[in-house]
Image (cartoon, helix red, strand yellow):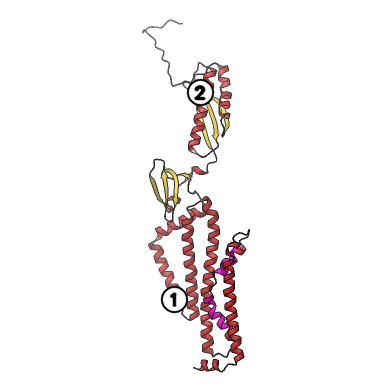
Amino acid sequence: MKSIDLLLDAPPSSAAIALAVTLFILLVAWSARALARRHHGLSRQTGTSVDDFLVDVVVRTKPLLLLFPAIYAGARVLPLTPELGRALAMLTRVSLVAQGAVWGVAVVEFALERYGRTRIESDPSAITTIRAFRFGAVIGVWIVAVLAALDNVGFDVTALIAGLGIGGVAIALATQNILGDLFASLSIVVDKPFVVGDAINIGEGDIGVVQHIGLKTTRIRSLSGEELVVSNGDLLRSRIRNYGRMPERRVVGKIGVTYQTPPDVLERLPGLIRAAVEQQEGVRFDRAHFMQFGESAYELELVYYVLTSNYGVFMDKQQAVNLAILRAFGEAGAEFAYPTRTLFVASGLGPQPEP
């Protein structure tokens, strides 16, 4: 009653100033929010992201949450009792904390949206992890806001924070496998050991194409057609061979020709092999040499690279090179060798005549 009496006894000029200040603050907040909403689309067309961020923050401003701060600013010219002043100040702080949480959520969502636009182009499955991270970040912002609001109201949040810490440890111990997979998913998204569409070989020898990277598991389409579902934690603990990151594939081959091949023909064969390789597009020749004398053939070694990671294209190029070598050897009169053994049989038991 004393506070009401003081307000009623206040000079009309002070009450008018208080009302004007309050309405002015609310009008500015409402006008800025309406203007930002109207030009929200135009800010997306500029080359900078600063205006996008500012517009997003202004759009998230809630005039209702600024009501008590506006009243508090206007009431500074009015005679208030200490109790009413403290209550108004407490409501103002709580309102500002809530508005700060709304702005904090806007910052988190803006940052994740920008990061997601660049990541989704190369890894569409990253959207799942980004959404999960957004959910966790928003929850964290509001938990901090609630604790700050309770502290401003007068509650002792120290015991509450300690209880939350003990509960968090218990929950973490109970769900450590799930949390491990969640953090492994985040590690896959950030470190990118593979992305959707990569052909990988897991430590167990399973080979397939990555179809989906989820929060807990990654799905791989194996070469035989079935879908492999592997937990993200187990996947990162394995040794992964990523064939999708191969800029080229190396081919090492051995060719054997019969011992009846004349030396001059044998000398020409590395050049014929090189010509057969170099006439193929997307293939880089490395070397070809007469390597050694084998058990049943002259052995030549061939090394070249197919400039793609696609296995189908790799096999097409290898087949074309093999056919070209086959034709070139046929025209040169060189015969391919196959494992043979020559047996010399001696007859009679006595000494054999000298040849």
Q: Is residue 74 above or below residue 345?
A: below
Q: Name the residue carrying label 2.
A: 326
x then y, percent, for residue 188: 48, 53
Secondary structure beneath dot 2 equals helix
Q: Given the current orientation, which residue lies at the most extreme left position?
A: 349
Amino acid under disc 1 = Ala
One can see residue 299 in this view: no
Magenta region, residue range: 52-73
x then y, percent, for residue 137: 49, 65
x then y, percent, for residue 41: 58, 62
Q: Name the residue carrying label 1.
A: 159
In the displayed structure, does residue 39 sit left or right of residue 146?
A: right
Mark 2 surroundings within 10 Å by alpha-carbon count, few (fewer than 14), some (14 through 19), many (20 or more): some
Residue pictured at 52% horizontal, 53% vertical: 120
In the depicted view, which residue is nearer to us: 251 or 293?
Answer: 251
Residue pictured at 52% horizontal, 70% vertical: 102
Q: How many marks?
A: 2
Distance from the alpha carbon under mark 1 to that under mark 2: 83 Å
Q: Are marks 1 and 2 in contact (CB under 8 Å)?
A: no
Amino acid under disc 2 = Leu
Residue pictured at 52% horizontal, 67% vertical: 105
Q: Given the current orientation, which residue lies at the most extreme front position?
A: 38
Residue 62 lies in magenta, yes or no?
yes
Mark 1 surroundings within 10 Å by alpha-carbon count, few (fewer than 14), some (14 through 19), many (20 or more): few
